[in-house]
Amino acid sequence: VKQAKASGKPEVYAPSEAREARRRFSIETELRRAIDNEELELAYQPLVDLRSGAVTGFEALARWTHEDRGRIGPTEFIPVAEESGLILDLGRWALDRAIATIAAWDRQNEGGLPFYVAVNLSAIQIARDDVVTCVGETLRHHGVSGDRLTLELTESAIVQDPGRAMRVFEGLKGLGASLSMDDFGTGYSSLAYLQKLPIDVLKIDKSFVRQMLDDSDSVSIVRAILSLAEALGMATTAEGIEGAPLATTLAALGCRTGQGYHFARPLAPDDALQFFREANPTITKN
Ligand code: C2E
Ligand code: MG
Ligand code: MG
Ligand code: MG
C-alpha cells in the first residue's frame, strides 16, 4: 500500500512527474464521477478445472471506459482509487454488481448454477471498511448464498494489522464465502499467518506462471507453492495461463484450477454465461 501523502517527502517533481501527477489527479476526479454514474463495469474471467476443463468460477474484474480517454485499465485506476480512498465506494460497487450478476444468472437457470464468483478486495477495504457487514447485507439483498462468493485478498491485507485481518477473514468465512490469497508469492506475508488464517486457495501470481516455460527457477517456485498449499490443505489456482503447454504442465504438477487468455479473456456477463454453458454441457440445459 503506497502512502505518498503521508510520506512527508517534499513535493518537487521533474516535468514528467508533474504530467504524471496531473493525470493521476484528473483520473481521481473522473473516477469519482465514473463510480457515481455507473461508467464502470465488471468483466468475468473463467476459472477452469485443469483436469476436466469445466468452468468452476469466474473472477470479476473492474473495467472503466472513459468517454474521451477510452479504456483505462485497473492497474492504473485501482492504485489511484486506493490512494484517494475511492476504493471504498468502488469496492462496495463491485461487490453489489458481482452479487447482483450471480442472482441474474441464477434467474436464467432453474435451480441456479454451480459456480462461484471471485471478487477482489483491496487491503484498504479490509483496514477501513466494515466488509463483513457489507458482504452479508449485499448477499441478503440479492438473495444469494455466501458459498457462491470467493473473496480475493492480497498479502498486504494481512501485514498491516494481522489481528484485524483474522477477524475479517473469519467473519467472511462465517458468511459461507471462500477466501483466496491473490498474487501469492509477490507479497510479504509470513508463512505463520498463512497457516493461521482461514484461507482456502492460493492463487499463484502470473509472473511465476508466465516464466515457467523458459525459466526452471520459476518452475521450482511454482512447485514449492503447490506443495506448500497441499501441506496447508489449500487449493491452488494459477493465473496468467496463455497457452496449452502451460495448462498441461500446471495440471501435471497438480495445480487444480487455471485462469488465463488460453481459456478466455475477461468477458461481459452474457458471454460469460454462454462460455459456462459450452464448457459444462452436462450441467446446463441450453
Ligand atoms: P488480479 O486480481 O491479479 O487479476 C488478474 C489479472 O490478470 C487481471 O488483470 C486479468 O485480466 C489478468 N490476466 C488474466 N489472464 C491473463 C493472461 O493469460 N495473461 C495476462 N497477461 N494477464 C492475464 P486486470 O483485469 O487488468 O486487473 C489487474 C488488477 O487490478 C487485478 O489483478 C486486481 O488486483 C485489480 N482489480 C481489478 N478489478 C478490481 C476490483 O474490482 N477491486 C479491486 N480491489 N481490485 C481490482
Ligand atoms: Mg484477483
Ligand atoms: Mg492475481
Ligand atoms: Mg496479479
Image (cartoon, rainbow, N blue to C red):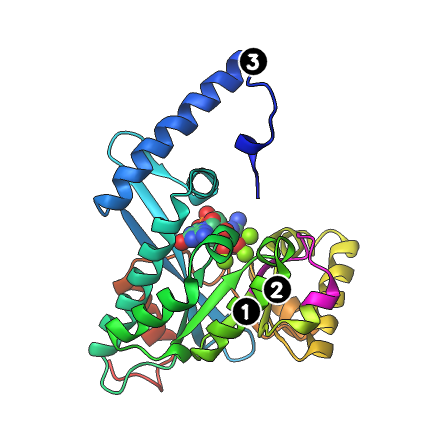
Q: Of the residues shown, which amino acid type is indicated by label 1?
A: Arg
Numbered range of the magenta stretch: 181-193
Task: Estimate the x, y position of residue 78 in percent, counting from the top left.
Answer: 44, 44
Q: Tell me the SS state at disc 1.
A: helix
Judge whether residue 266 can be spotted in this image. Answer: yes
> In the image, 123: left or right of 137?
right
Residue drawn at (45%, 18%), measured in percent from left and top? 19
Q: Of the residues shown, which amino acid type is indicated by label 2?
A: Gly
Which residue bears the numbered disc 2?
163
Q: Nearer the viewer, residue 105 or 52?
A: 105
CB under 8 Å between callouts 2 and 1? Answer: yes
Which residue bears the numbered disc 1?
167
Task: Estimate the x, y position of residue 71 in percent, counting from the top left.
Answer: 34, 38
Residue depth check, mark 3 versus mark 2: number of the one nearer the observer: 2
Mark closest to the chain's N terminus, 3 or 2 = 3
Farthest residue, direction top: 15
> In the image, 122: left or right of 250?
left
